[in-house]
Amino acid sequence: MTSPLETAEDLAGLKRVVIEPLTRVEGHGKVTLLQDQEGHIRQARLHIAEFRGFEKFIQGRPYWELPVVVQRLCGICPVSHHLAAAKATDRLVGVTELTPTAEKVRRLMHYGQTLQSHALHFFHLASPDLLFGYDDEVHHRNILGLIQDHPELARQGVLLRKYGQEVIRVTAGRRVHGNGAIPGGVNKSVSPEERDTLKRDIGQVVRWGTEAVELIKRLFTHQLAYHSRFGSVPANTLSLVRGDGAFELYQGALRARDPEGRMIFDQVADRDYGEHLREAVKSWSYMKFPFIAELGPERGWYRVGPLARVNNCGFFPTALAEAERREFIALGKGAPVQSALAYHWARLIELLYCAEAIENLLEDPDISGDDLVTRGELQPSGIGVVEAPRGTLFHHYEIDSEGLVTKANLIVSTTNNNQAMNESIRQVAREYLDGNELTEPLLNRIEVAIRAYDPCLSCATHALGRMPLEVVLVDAAGGVVDHRYRQWDGGSSTLSTER
Amino acid sequence: MGPELVNRLKGEQDAGAYPELDLLTDFQPQVEHALDLRQRSWVLIADASLRARPPFELTRMRPRRDPSFTTHALTPAAVLQVYREIEGAEPPATVLLAIRGYRFELGEGLSAGAATNLTACLRWLRRLLATEASRWDALLRHAPG
């Protein structure tokens, strides 16, 4: 059920607080809070402006450009878009099964991408909150503060990122916006020299992954009751799983469970997603609210991403990650774990899994094979689904007889998590902000909840551009009490405050 | 324009020029890019800018903590700061080369004005790269911007 804080009953006399740290040129994200005279929160909403310009932009372009051009959607997970589009174009060229080399090289690329993205997410964006506390001074509560106070940890985060980027460079052909995956396969395999270079450091990467899970366990269980409640909402979960129910990031079928862990559906082919998922529209948000058709919009919203995936799968196919999953799942005492901050724990179990999976693939001779591409007959429609670092990512294209795109629909992780993120910030607002003067550390708790799900809204806004930051505090009469604005332009920035 | 600049220099390098130049392209500066600064004498970071005076501006970069940690793209100054803190040493001399661009719509090619600015920048860079690195400090003082 959605929270009563979604819409206030009576807007009269309510003070409006806007947190707007997520703005982009064509679309933006912000949080609005309505507070009454006694400081009680009456309404809390996360608004993300979903801009459909990218889908429009690719209409009329040839399908074979898609895996490269869609990478412009996101600077953090371009490989996820690359692979989702590649899987969709596989279908467009009539290919349902890749060669072993093509599939394994793509998997390697995907694991490298997930490893580096999770390392960035946890070490650089989220861990300062957990290590320093939400009330820490804002200029210290960041990656540079982390480097200063925990240099070895920060160094590990940097080197994990670097390793993941190297895996991407080797498999995608370039450091940025690679073209490794093509319709029906890949355009290169991994040379023995490249494989040996990656093998040299993978043992260390697995050890760091293990240590990272130990760290988040210590941080989470240090204040177990608090962390378990923070942003906790009873959500359905959606993710890909393998045919045998194993954890899966690249190729699988859809599974959904309810908040108690009961199966809603399982082994739904990704191309049939439209039969089970719908998108609702709300008057106050530009972004749609997907829901499970069987349950309807009120009860059918769901969560995607690491927390959903680890809750949803039956087991991890690698030993270290599976041992960690068992310990994690025990937290839920038989039901899915629902705390927003448990995302970080699940995320690091996935990071460890990716390290193990890379290690296994580097021992597989198929990654250096030369059978790269499968061919078939052109089809009018193609759907590709992968588990991106932040959750399930759908790419759906239709083409004409010339191979030009006539229709495109992308459902990104942030859209899938829209209602769940809204519910979590309402829980945080109710639990920690209600009745209080809204200070920066308190407002930061709202951002902590959002960061747990998804600190990157560029996929959701489907836009690229400069990123201003604006926070406006408005009193009951509508007057501006405080206004802070930061403008970015490439390499420079200014921060100004008005009163 | 940054990748285009690199592509053109790469073409000249393939023909035998600039043997000591290492060319890298990336999308958004992040912490791991501090590791790319290791063992460099000079670093030139080239990017398009909406605010630079045409044809291009040069800015000597110093390590600095700034609010770019809240985004997925650190500023060059913040990357230098990361280098200083994880390496425990001062970063190499770094210059930001901001080439004036005008339009940044998806799928758009170089505008005529941007192409002119890029050509001017390349001409200046070729002169710089033909000069001993020990004299770069003096050259950079008299560069546009």
Image: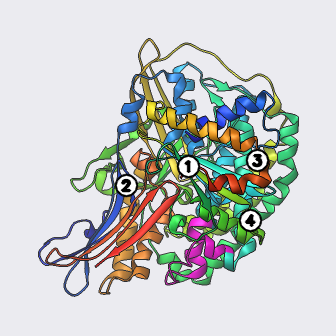
SS class, disc 3: helix
How busy is the neighbourhood of tag 3: few (under 14 within 10 Å), some, or many (20 plus)?
A: many
Q: Which mark is residue A301?
A: 2
Q: Chain of mark 1?
A: B
Q: Nearer the viewer, mark 3 or mark 1?
A: 1
Q: In this rendering, is residue B63 above or below A228?
A: above
**Which of the two residues, A162 or A368, is positioned nearer the viewer here?**
A162
Label 4 to label 1: alpha-carbon separation: 40 Å
SS class, disc 2: loop
**Which of the two residues, B126 or A280, is positioned nearer the viewer here?**
B126
Q: Which residue is mark 3?
A: A358
Q: Nearer the viewer, mark 2 or mark 1?
A: 1
Check chain identity for marks 3 and 1: say if they share one: no
Give the amino acid at mark 3.
Answer: Ile
Q: Which mark is residue A428?
A: none
Q: Nearer the viewer, mark 4 or mark 1?
A: 1
Q: Which of the 4 image quadrants contains residue A43?
A: bottom left
Residue drawn at 58 percent across, 74 percent down = A128
Residue A259 drawn at (x, y percent): 44, 62
Q: Which residue is mark 4?
A: A156
Residue drawn at 28 percent across, 79 percent down = A499
Please state the extent of the stretch shown in magenta in the rendering: A124-147
Give the amino acid at mark 2.
Answer: Trp
SS class, disc 4: helix
Q: Chain of mark 2?
A: A
Residue drawn at 55 percent across, 75 percent down = A129
Q: Which residue is mark 1?
A: B144
Residue B2 drawn at (x, y percent): 58, 41
